């Protein structure tokens, strides 16, 4: 079936955490989208450093969103999440009132120097050992991630079911794509034993619609704690991610 001309376009790969959260929101809300391959850091065709991609997104990063409906074309996962919630009136996930948004925004902003380090300290250096991430950078990322996780474990998740009260918001989706990827059923790169509230929350988040579809790529990647994946496995994981999302989209459309 041909896609309507005004379908939202998302550029990226399924293994990218900030891409994953945008796709998850769209699946959760059953909002149709076109998912276009953009390989991070690559200068080849379909790469984010290729002149064709740079012409539409000069910062060369994914996720990148084009909304033909409004002409908005932006990068940055959290800006995309907020835009989509406001545009579509998804106030259950990002309320209309400034006070309700403030706590969510605080988590979304602190994320970049906090929970995002799950990828800098654990995911990236274990998936791409060949890139030899500098040890001091990885060490600081380990500490920063563990500290950020300890804060939500002892505070937000100790007081309520989700990060902001007892209803899920986009702060939960954004945080989970970083934390959740390290669980034993995915990459198995972090010991969650001392974090019981986080384990309960991750269990709840795994029941949220769209979770399994956006995490299919990580299931395919598998446990990488003892051995890094070869490049064929990384490609296969991304391909499976695309195929799962395409299948899910066609089921939703019918
Ligand atoms: N702050 C950005 C981070 C995006 C990001 O780190 N994207 C990575 C892939 S996971 C990327 O595009 N890397 C390509 C590059 O650095 O050249 C967001 O939240 O969207």
Image (cartoon, rainbow, N blue to C red):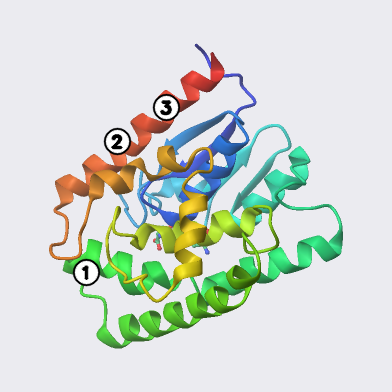
Residue 240's label in the rendered image is 2
Q: Secondary structure at mark 3?
A: helix
Q: Position of residue 249 (x, y in %)?
A: 49, 25
Dot 2: few (<14), some (14–19), or many (≥20) neighbours within 10 Å?
A: many
Query: Against 229, is 109 above or below?
Result: below
Cβ–Cβ under 8 Å for marks 2 and 3: no
Q: Is mark 2 within 8 Å of ligand 1?
A: no
- Front residue of 72/123: it is 123
Q: Quadrant of residue 131?
A: bottom left
Q: Is residue 42 left or right of residue 171?
A: left
Q: Is mark 3 within 8 Å of ligand 1?
A: no
- Front residue of 208/89: it is 208
Distance between mark 2 and mark 1 Cα atoms: 24 Å
Q: Position of residue 223 (x, y in %)?
A: 21, 56
Residue that carries the numbered disc 3 in the rendered image: 246
Dot 1: few (<14), some (14–19), or many (≥20) neighbours within 10 Å?
A: few
Q: Quadrant of residue 187?
A: bottom left
Q: Is residue 93 left or right of residue 112?
A: right
Which mark is first along the chain, 3 or 1? Answer: 1
Q: Quadrant of residue 170?
A: bottom right
Q: Secondary structure at mark 1?
A: helix
Query: Against 251, is 145 above or below?
Result: below
Tell me what residue is drawn at x 13 percent, y 62 percent: 227
Q: Quadrant of the C terminus?
A: top right
């Amino acid at each position: 079936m041909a896609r309507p001309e005004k379908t939202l376009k998302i550029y990226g790969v399924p293994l990218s955490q900030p891409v994953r959260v945008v796709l998850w929101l769209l699946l959760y809300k059953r909002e149709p989208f076109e998912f276009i391959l953009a390989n991070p850091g690559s200068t080849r065709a379909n790469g984010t450093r290729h002149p064709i991609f740079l012409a539409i997104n000069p910062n060369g990063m994914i996720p990148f969103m084009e909304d033909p409906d409004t002409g908005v074309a932006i990068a940055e996962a959290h800006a995309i999440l907020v835009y989509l919630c406001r545009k579509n009136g998804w106030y259950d996930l990002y309320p209309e009132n400034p006070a309700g948004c403030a706590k969510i925004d605080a988590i979304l902003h602190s994320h970049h120097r906090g929970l995002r380090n799950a990828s800098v300290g654990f995911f990236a250096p274990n998936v791409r050992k060949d890139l030899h991430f500098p040890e001091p950078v990885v060490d600081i990322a380990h500490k920063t991630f563990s500290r950020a996780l300890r804060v939500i474990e002892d505070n937000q998740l100790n007081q309520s079911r989700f990060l902001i009260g007892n209803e899920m918001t986009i702060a939960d989706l954004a945080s989970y794509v970083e934390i959740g990827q390290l669980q034993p059923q995915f990459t198995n790169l972090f010991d969650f034993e001392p974090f019981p509230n986080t384990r309960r929350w991750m269990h709840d988040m795994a029941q949220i619609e769209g979770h399994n579809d956006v995490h299919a790529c990580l299931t395919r990647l598998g446990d990488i704690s003892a051995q890094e994946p070869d490049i064929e496995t990384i490609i296969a994981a991304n391909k499976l991610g695309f195929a799962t999302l395409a299948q899910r989209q066609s089921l939703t459309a019918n």
